[in-house]
Image (tube, grey):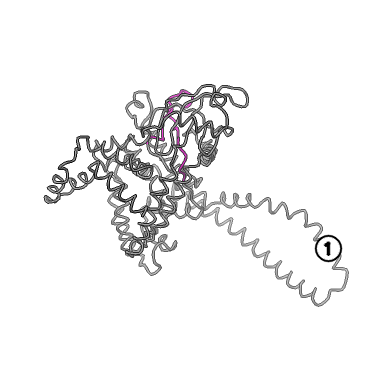
Amino acid sequence: MKHWARGATIVRVVWRNGLDQLLLDGLQKPGLRWLARALTLGRRLHKPRGQRLREALEQLGPIFVKFGQVLSTRRDLLPPDIADELALLQDRVPPFAADIAVATIERAFRRPIAEVFEHFERVPVASASIAQVHFATLRDRTGQQREVAVKVLRPGMLPVIEKDLSLMRMMASWVERLSADGRRLKPREVVAEFDNYLHDELDLVREAANAAQLRRNMAGLDLVLIPEIFWDYCHPEVMVMQRMDGVPISQVERLRVAGVDIPKLARDGVTIFFTQVFRDGFFHADMHPGNIQVSLDPTSFGRYISLDFGIVGTLTEFDKEYLAQNFTAFFRRDYKRVAELHIESGWVPPETRVNELEAAIRTVCEPYFDRPLKEISLGMVLMRLFQTSRRFNVEIQPQLVLLQKTLLNIEGLGRQLDPDLDLWSTAKPFLEKWMLEQMGPQRLWRELRAQAPHYAQMLPELPLLLHQYLRQRRTEPTPLVRELLEAQKRTNRLLQSLIYGGLGFVLGLLLMQWLVRMRLF
């Protein structure tokens, strides 16, 4: 019954804000347009359509706000008036009362707010679907006064999210039962992934840990700033971090007037994304414009500022290697290799014919090469690939849903910054370098270094083992010992062969890397 009650709430909000009219007006059938006009009788729909859509998403709760945030980055798919309104969802969701924020902080730290902060601004500087942010001043452990940003969780979030997720789980079960194609899409697993990420966002200590990890990972890149976390002032409902001053990345004209190199900024964004995905396997997965700023400070001019780390994506070594090989083959237009990788990974049935899958992928991708980003809709490419995947029964991988969402966000940002950006040529050198590192002796050296503590633990035991062996040699060996010695000799010969084979393998890797470099450069 609670599912039906939530469904009725959604229908009521849709009706009250006239979203049915937005859908029917967009259809070309004359009869449906007449139906849309008839349904408006008796309703006061005087507000602009974009405002009505935004307010409806805000009324429906955080999951729908997240959906609106993703849509807001795709101005190529939306009318300008709707895109402008949805952009307000990025950091201008109506705030909750300052008294509630203060009460949450005092409950978390068990002392009056005046004892926690020297100064606390009651008016929030930003308000989103999950939390809102206030500026404050505190003294750190060294007694130094620091400007900080205080993130406070929006009250009553868990019950609302649980209701929507329960409804989504029920609908996913229906889709799986009613459609073979639905089973291929794994909707229940996708909802489970979404469930994990949303619940992670409700724990601000986890978000602080995500920020600290990203800050370490990005320390040597000099392209992005991540705020410092004040761990003495972190709680599941409150997070205190370094205050960052920058210009929202959506204010492109203001950045241009300030002297920021906009094309370089677009290229840096692609580099940051691919570095986080393929080098670290740990990436910021909520990169809408409300979470990205640009520094104008002379010491860090033109660098990105990342905010809001509630949603991060992770990839295993297998996922990273598989995706990198796919991207590299795609950039080289080696569609046969892309098809073979899909079959090798088990994403498509093993009986799939390589040449047919290769031809289908070529048909989708080839028209988009050698074009600037302004002439490419990655969303359209993904949609056509999705249609192709249905034909070949490709299984959707739930762990890559966040990556696909973030890739669309990156494209939306790139389109706003520099429509002439060539996404493919910017990413290709990075991926080829990464592949060389994965195949070459650097990978072998990393593996040996990782195993070094294990070998170091074994080395002190070798003299004792050798001494015991020599003492046993003085006595006449029993048949059992002779049998063991023969087995040891066979093992020694095998180890000798393995050592020689390993040396040959290393030399082969060096030769292969030299040949690959000659081919690339």
In the picture, measured across the screen, residue 303 lies left or right of residue 212, that is left
Q: Amino acid at mark 1?
A: Gln
Front-most of residues 63 and 140: 63
Q: Position of residue 87 (x, y in %)?
A: 32, 35
Q: Nearer the viewer, residue 319 or 141?
A: 141
The residue depicted at 39 percent of the width and 32 percent of the height is 95
Q: Residue 471: x percent and y percent?
A: 86, 65
Q: Residue furthest front?
A: 1
Let me know if residue 323 is in the magenta part.
no
- Judge left or right: residue 238 versus residue 415: right
- Magenta segment includes 310: yes
Give me the residue at 42% from left, 60% from top: 341
Counting from the top left corner in percent of width and height, residue 205 is at: 53, 39
In the picture of the structure, the residue carrying the numbered disc 1 is 468
- Height in image: 312 above or below 387? above
Taking the view exactly as shown, the residue that stands out farthest to the right is 475
Report the side of 377 relative to 143 (left or right). left
Quarter of image, res 173: bottom left
x 61%, y 62%: residue: 501
**Residue 376 location (% of width, % of height):** 29, 45
Q: Find the magenta span and give its range.
A: 289-312
Q: Callout 1: few (<14), some (14-19), or many (20+) C-alpha neighbours within 10 Å? A: few
Mark 1, secondary structure of its residue: helix
In the rendered image, which quarter is residue 360 located in?
Answer: bottom left
Q: Is residue 360 above or below residue 98?
A: below
Residue 491 is drawn in which quadrant? bottom right
Q: Residue at coordinates 62% horizontally, 58% vertically from top-left?
A: 503
